Image (cartoon, rainbow, N blue to C red):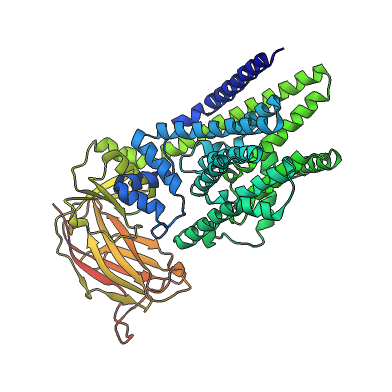
């Protein structure tokens, strides 16, 4: 057979492999396209709607204004998707599925280039793209790991080309993609260790310290620059050791859990999973030692190195297995190829059947996960959906203020649907609202069934507090001011109030705030008590409390008052108000006059 025919056959087989991998990803992940945005996705929609282009780019590229992590390329990806698709989640999910497919194809190309074994490359890619433990990464646009992995795999491809041909352009391309990976996900910082392993273990190049320093110096400089940017950012990222990211007793259990989930993607139970994982690792170690299999040694080191940046987090998450899963997929494919090469023909067909069943089972698990996430996304939008049905449009200048719920997701939903001509706030927001600074303020209260109740805001109110605010309660809490939706409310409707509070000192207990509507004789007509996490507050911390009092339809018309104070739920003892000299003079602020009636 001539060389031209051999090349034609190789191209045809490669095309078939690419087509097969693409078909598997399209079929398995098609259910994920119906998932809407979920959780943190909405925070990006909020940024994209509220910020102009310059503000948005500065937010992601300037580490001095970043407060979550330094991932500018991830922000660029979201900007590009939003430019193409707006706030339609379908397009975002298509892009994330295609990124997952790209990683599978890059893995196929890398394994084939290094091993010259098409079956090994094909199985590696198929195992990787169908692993259920990492499928969420391909279905959740806010997760940057598949984008970072694509950059890392591209950098690996050009690094191998550089090692083979020593061309400067391949070196620069590898360095460029490494920098892009760093700017997408900080865990990519370990990639030079993987590249070094390819060079020393797989390609068996000599270990010369000066040559290695010359080749990897720029990679090290890029990594140190990222660390500097992360440290400069006011971030929850890995460099600041926040949210529990630190060395400690949790490292070993986390590593064991990750290593177990890596090789046992179908969980049985924790004990059985660990026993099975131990057996798999023992077999792999024995094989690497007995056969002097450098590839297995390399894959084991890759799995460990890529896990190192994530094990200090206090709680393991399977999505962090995305990069380590590359090593597992190749190792699993090596086992299948070895079994096929060392068994009779009938066994080869049996192995093929097992592989097919494994892939189908993975597909079923991915479909189950997609259905679960789609249901969660639908539930998350329930409040917004109910309001949207009542209000196809809102007039420009509308300010929607949620008095008893977080708005992390809701703000993105409203801005994505109505645009930045409206604003959204909440008592949990750090920004204090000025309801009447907006032309069309609207308070929304979620009742016990999570149904949104709309409470209109009157242009003004004339209720006054006695004693005048601010007032200190037991030198622990200060009631600084208050706001009312209206000082007039009809029977059968809701009275909404917002209280602005400040902690005056550290405390070792949680206090309960009471907000009672009382008549002229002091009888309680309506009330709302709420436990407050004051023990977690520090002196000078400020916060807000929203109270909604449902007024019974049979309430007689007339003047009423609101009484506000605090008590210790454990003892029932109220906190006294104190003056500048520390003298007590009562235990409740009275706000009057509240009129109930038409």
Query: In x, y percent, where is residue 493?
Result: 23, 50
Query: Does residue 28 sit above or below 2 in this rendering?
Result: below
Query: Which quarter of the figure has residue 199?
Result: top right
The residue depicted at 61 percent of the width and 41 percent of the height is 159
Query: Does residue 210 sit above or below 465 in this rendering?
Result: above
> Which of the image's four quarters has the N terminus?
top right
In the depicted view, which residue is nearer to us: 595 or 393? 393
In the depicted view, which residue is nearer to us: 179 or 184? 179
The residue depicted at 37 percent of the width and 53 percent of the height is 59
In the depicted view, which residue is nearer to us: 439 or 202? 202
Q: Is residue 454 left or right of residue 206?
A: left
Query: In x, y percent, where is residue 81?
Result: 39, 37
The residue sitting at the top extreme is 1
The residue depicted at 32 percent of the width and 40 percent of the height is 416
The residue depicted at 19 percent of the width and 48 percent of the height is 397
In the depicted view, which residue is nearer to us: 46 or 574? 46
């Amino acid at each position: 057979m001539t060389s031209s025919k051999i090349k034609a056959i190789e191209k045809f087989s490669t095309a078939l492999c690419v087509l097969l991998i693409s078909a598997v990803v399209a079929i398995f992940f098609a259910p994920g396209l119906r998932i809407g945005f979920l959780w943190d996705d909405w925070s990006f929609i909020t940024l994209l709607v509220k910020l102009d282009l310059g503000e948005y780019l500065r937010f992601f590229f300037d580490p001095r204004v970043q407060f979550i992590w330094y991932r500018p390329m991830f922000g660029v990806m979201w900007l590009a998707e939003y430019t193409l698709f707006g706030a339609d989640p379908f397009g975002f999910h298509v892009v994330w599925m295609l990124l997952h497919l790209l990683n599978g194809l890059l893995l196929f190309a890398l394994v084939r280039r290094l091993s010259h074994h098409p079956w090994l490359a094909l199985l590696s890619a198929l195992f990787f793209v169908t692993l259920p433990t990492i499928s969420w990464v391909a279905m959740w646009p806010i997760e940057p790991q598949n984008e970072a992995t694509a950059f890392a795999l591209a950098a690996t491809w050009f690094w191998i080309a550089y090692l083979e041909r020593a061309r400067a352009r391949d070196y620069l391309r590898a360095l460029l993609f490494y920098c892009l990976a760093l700017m997408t996900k900080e865990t990519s910082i370990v990639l030079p260790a993987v590249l070094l392993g390819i060079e020393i273990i797989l390609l068996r190049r000599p270990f010369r310290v000066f040559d290695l320093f010359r080749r990897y110096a720029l990679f090290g400089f890029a990594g140190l620059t990222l660390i500097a940017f992360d440290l400069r950012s006011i971030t929850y990222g890995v460099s600041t050791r926040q949210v529990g990211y630190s060395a400690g007793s949790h490292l070993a259990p986390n590593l064991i859990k990750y290593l177990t989930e890596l090789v046992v993607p179908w969980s049985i139970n924790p004990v059985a999973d660990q026993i099975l994982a131990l057996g798999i690792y023992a077999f792999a170690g024995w094989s690497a030692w007995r056969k002097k299999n450098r590839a297995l040694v390399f894959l084991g080191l890759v799995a460990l190195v890529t896990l190192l940046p994530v094990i200090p987090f206090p709680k393991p998450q399977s999505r962090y297995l995305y990069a380590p899963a590359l090593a597992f997929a190749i190792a699993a494919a090596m086992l299948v190829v070895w079994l096929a090469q060392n068994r009779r023909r009938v066994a080869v067909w049996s192995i093929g059947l097992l592989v097919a069943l494994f892939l189908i089972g993975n597909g079923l698990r991915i479909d189950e996960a997609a259905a679960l996430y789609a249901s969660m996304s639908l539930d998350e939008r329930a409040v917004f959906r109910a309001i949207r049905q009542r209000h196809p449009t809102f007039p420009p200048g509308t300010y929607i203020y949620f008095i008893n719920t977080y708005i992390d997701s809701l703000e993105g939903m409203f801005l994505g649907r109505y645009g930045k001509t409206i604003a959204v706030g909440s008592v949990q927001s750090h920004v204090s609202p000025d309801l009447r600074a907006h032309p069309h303020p609207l308070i929304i209260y979620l009742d016990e069934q999570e149904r949104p109740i709309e409470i209109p805001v009157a242009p003004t109110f004339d209720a006054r507090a006695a004693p005048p605010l601010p007032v200190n309660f037991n030198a622990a809490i200060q009631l600084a001011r208050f706001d009312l939706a209206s000082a007039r409310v009809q029977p059968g409707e809701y009275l909404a109030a917002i209280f602005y509070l400040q902690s005056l000192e550290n405390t070792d207990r949680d206090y309960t705030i009471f907000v009672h509507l009382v008549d002229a004789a002091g009888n309680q007509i309506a009330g709302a008590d709420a436990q407050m996490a004051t023990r977690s507050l520090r002196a000078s911390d400020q916060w807000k409390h929203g109270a909604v009092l449902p007024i019974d339809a049979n309430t007689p018309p007339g003047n009423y008052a609101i009484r506000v104070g605090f008590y210790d739920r454990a003892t029932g003892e109220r906190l006294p108000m104190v003056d500048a000299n520390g003298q007590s003079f009562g235990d409740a602020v009275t706000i009057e006059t509240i009129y109930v009636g038409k």
